[in-house]
Amino acid sequence: MAIVDTSNNTAVQDLFNNKVKTATTNSGVGDATKTATGSQSLGKDAFLQLLVTQLKNQNPLSPQDNGAFVAQLAQFSSLEGINTLNDSVNNISSNFSSSQALQASSLVGRSIITQTDKTLVDTSKSMTGSVAVPAATGNVSIKITDKDGNVVRTLELVDQNAGNSDFIWDGKNEKGEVAPAGTYTFNATTKNDKGDAVALATSLPATVTSVTLSKTGGEMLLNLAGGMGSVKLSQIQTIGT
């Protein structure tokens, strides 16, 4: 807000000078304003005080333009409204993050299904996964390999339509023996019209062990058991027990 002294009365300038008397030549406009109000920006009380003082001490023979005062008030009101809106949005964002954190923490210890090709398997019971089939095909082959890369079992799915096709592994190897519990990789493939192998995406169950919150406002991560890494909350397809 510009302060113009159109008379011999310098009350407006004196008021402003008293508020910024400790500002130095190196401080700049921002530091002078901070000194005047004791905050980072010119407050509405200080603004109105300066405005009223200017009105009281204007030259009656050459008064200030009313339109300029109205414009200054409108600008200040708009700025104050934007600051209030920013505070409200920040509060909403903070509340949303807290709510999301509480929801994610409830997933700890629960089983989820997410798109991955590797998971920790308890072979004492059957495990259900799915394969994303882009188009109808006559055969889908799923090779299950252990942590050493040895093929433990091959599952064959015939006459599959486009979409997600479920499969079940009973935890046994090709000899019908129960495989040891551990980390297994599932490689699903099919063949195109030319007879070439085409890799397919698999979705497997995993257990959530902990939740990592982002310090930069990003999406939180769910940490999986068995060193399977982390997945984003939005990547969960199904939540089990």
Image: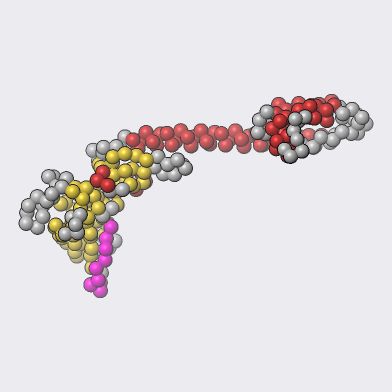
Residue displayed at 65% across by 33% down: 40
Q: Is residue 135 above or below residue 112?
A: below
Q: Nearer the viewer, residue 58 or 11?
A: 11
Q: Position of residue 11 (x, y in %)?
A: 85, 26
Quadrant containing the C terminus is: top left
Q: Position of residue 219 (x, y in %)?
A: 41, 44
Q: Position of residue 44 (x, y in %)?
A: 69, 29
Q: From the viewer's perspective, is 207 left or right of 95?
A: left
Q: In the rendered image, which quarter is residue 50 located in?
A: top right
Residue displayed at 37% across by 40% down: 212
Q: Which residues are magenta?
A: 193-201
- Magenta span has 197? yes
Say how many tags the image has. 0
Q: Residue furthest bottom?
A: 194
How is colour applied across the structure in the image?
secondary structure
Quadrant containing the N terminus is: top right
Residue displayed at 22% across by 56% down: 186
Q: From the viewer's perspective, is 11 left or right of 103?
A: right
Q: In the rendered image, which quarter is residue 131 located in?
A: bottom left
Q: Position of residue 183 (x, y in %)?
A: 21, 50
Q: Nearer the viewer, residue 116 or 234?
A: 116
Q: From the viewer's perspective, is 22 left or right of 139?
A: right
Residue displayed at 72% across by 38% down: 27
Residue 38 appears anywhere in the view: yes
Residue 74 appears anywhere in the view: no
- Magenta span has 166? no
Q: Is residue 138 above or below residue 38?
A: below
Q: Nearer the viewer, residue 55 or 146?
A: 146
